[in-house]
Structure formats: structure tokens, C-alpha cells
Image (cartoon, rainbow, N blue to C red):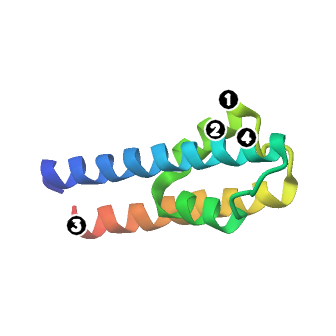
Amino acid sequence: MHVSAWLLVATAYGALSLISFTLYACDKAAARRGGRRIAERVLHLLDLMGGWPGGWLAQKTLHHKCSKRAFQRVYGFTVLLNAGLLASLLLRFA
């Protein structure tokens, strides 16, 4: 895979992770104040698209969604699915 492609993938993961972390933080703040929450499917979709490192960091630093087992099961699946898709893409274009 060409260097520019690696840079594009890294940039996409970084941007999606930043968005994911931000949405987790907004959801945590909304939960504390009783405001409108971010739908879990939105968080999962971002994680699936490549924002899961930001989701993981938000869960660890903000302690948000980390004890909800159903959420964690789907989150784990999104990470595995994303990693598998990325690996197949990298193998295809290697």
C-alpha cells in the first residue's frame, strides 16, 4: 500500500476517533444533566466506521458506557468487524 494511502487511512481513523470521543463526551454530559442523549446506534456506527479508538479512550477516561454490558458486546463486535474489514482491505491492496 502506498504511503499516501496509509496517511489517508490514519487521518480517517484520527478524525473519526475525535468525533467519536466528542460524541461520547456530549452523551455523558447530557446523561448527567438529564438532557437529550446521543443514540447508541450513532456511537456504534462511528465506532464501526473507524472511530473505535476514540470510543475506547472516551470509555476509559470518561467512564462512560463502560459498565453497560449490552453496549460493550456491540462495541466489541464493531471493533472486531472494523479490524477485519481493514485487514481485508490492506491485504487486497498490499
Instruction: Give the amino acid at mark 1.
Output: Thr
Left/right of residue 73 with respect to residue 22 in the rendered view: right
Name the residue located 71 percent from the left edge and 32 percent from the top edge.
62
Distance from disc 1 to disc 4, alpha carbons, whole Å, reads 14 Å
Q: Residues within 10 Å of mark 3 (few under 14, many from 20)?
A: few
Looking at the image, tell me whether mark 3 or mark 1 is earlier in sequence order. 1
The residue identified by callout 1 is 61
Question: Which of marks 4 and 3 precedes in the sequence?
Answer: 4
Q: Secondary structure at mark 3?
A: helix
Identify the secondary structure beneath mark 1: helix
Instruction: Tell me the CA gap for discs 2 and 3.
Output: 32 Å
Point out the image quarter for the N terminus. Answer: bottom left
- Name which residue type carries label 4: Ala
Q: Mark 2 or mark 3: which is in front?
A: 2
Residue type at numbered disc 2? Ala
- Of mark 4 and mark 2, the one earlier in the sequence is 4
